[in-house]
Image (cartoon, helix red, strand yellow):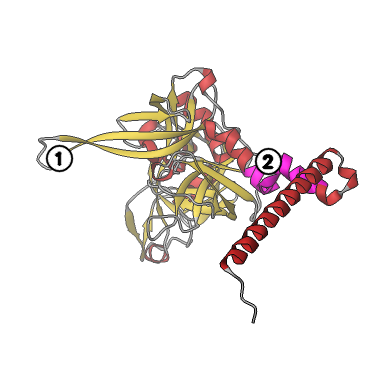
Amino acid sequence: MYRLSPKQILLISLTSALLSAVAVAVYDRHWREAESVAATNPSKDPAAAAQGARATDPSRRHQPILPDDQNNIDVYDNVSPGVVNITSTSYREDFWGLDVYPEQGTGSGSIIDQKGNILTNYHVVKDAQELKVTLSDKTTYDATLVGADPDNDLAVINISARESKLHVVPMGGSEDLRVGQKVLAIGNPFALDLTLTRGIISGLGRPLKTSNGRTVENVIQTDASINPGNSGGPLLNANGEMIGVNTAIYSPSGGSVGIGFAVPIETAKRILPDLIAYGRVLRPWLGIATRMVTPQIASQLNLGTTEGLIITGVLPNGPADKAGIVGSTRARWHGDRYQIDADILTKIDNQKIRNDDDLYKTLNNYKTNDSVDVEIFRQGRSMHLKVQLEAKPTRYSR
């Protein structure tokens, strides 16, 4: 066997390294020339042209933004400057009354005009002794309460800021929404300002009980993540228009589980003029106190009807009193049975009235000074009376 000497091995290694270096240099020079030619004259080599384009255009190195993603980005960029962070502060005494400490809550709101009016939830500002609003540029303003509607969990507050600071969130419509339609929510969950979440409309026409026991009708259900701090912020369609006011979540744990609710924007648009002008909603009413008819009451008092509202009180000189409606809380023995001298409200303009929610929902379709046909049941027979609705006095508002 032939054996190489150490000098021969060293010489072969140096020669191999030199040849490798020359080969790499030649290949690199050839490749750069090919890229340059392809970039300046792409028709000669399509593959090289594509490679050259990627090398000379840095933006081509990233994945393109999909149309739906771009829509989310556009909505956020256009709308988020009009979404505000609201901090409410109330002061409480300690158990012994020796010290006063602040309690703070946070929520969201939408700027709705160039006068500094902001739409939010009533529960965000309820009982607040101080209100602060922080805009998207981090500037903070003192806010005042303009009007509140606990029945729909809506309120309007106001800040004094230059018009250039006030980016109005456009209002859309909520009458033609469809289940499955994409929606986006912007708010300040857990004090994380201007967070965007997306989802779809999961349901329509949901009833939602507010803190004062009233039922908001036609509420929008969505799976877009809504958490504490989102309350009062806008629910938006793909055009960046507000279609609802995020107001509540269903959550056994206190966090978002994909069931959120928003008050429809049509409800807000209907009451906003009253909130701004009068500080409250001028709701029509009959001026009555009622008790729901139950099967047990119907049987005990031999009412002759199993549905309706017993008129237990009538406001003197109120709408019902002027129309001749009678109320009473007394039952008397008449022959062989008890009888109540009160009228029983059964229908308004042919709409059945079975409980207070039916009465509230039906009257919400009217304005003050409208006349309605009221059907009552009096001593075993039906009667129809015309009643002109009046605005509910402030002292009777919840």
Nearest to the observer: residue 235 or residue 382: 235
Residue 205 visible:
yes
Is tag 1's residue or tag 2's residue first in the polypeptide sequence? 2
Which residue is label 2 attached to? 58
Which residue is label 1 attached to? 94
Q: Position of residue 147 (x, y in %)?
A: 43, 30
C-alpha distance separating marks 1 and 2: 63 Å
User: Which region is colored magenta?
Assistant: 49-72
User: Dot 2 lies on which element?
Assistant: helix
User: Dot 1 lies on which element?
Assistant: loop
The residue shown at (49%, 38%) is 323
Quadrant (top left, top right, bottom left, bottom right) of the C terminus: top left
Residue 322 visible:
no
Q: Position of residue 51 (x, y in %)?
A: 77, 48
Q: Position of residue 229 (x, y in %)?
A: 41, 43
What's the residue type where badge 2 is placed? Pro
| Mark 1 Cα shell of 10 Å, populated few (<14), some (14-19), many (≥20) | few
Comparing labels 1 and 2, the label whose residue is closer to the camera: 2
User: In the rendered view, does 52 fall on the left or right side of 276?
Assistant: right
What's the residue type where badge 1 is placed? Asp
Quadrant (top left, top right, bottom left, bottom right) of the N terminus: bottom right
State yes or no: residue 140 in magenta: no
C-beta proximity under 8 Å, tags 1 and 2: no
State yes or no: residue 52 in magenta: yes
User: In the rendered view, does 362 fall on the left or right side of 254?
Assistant: right
Majority secondary structure in the magenta region? helix
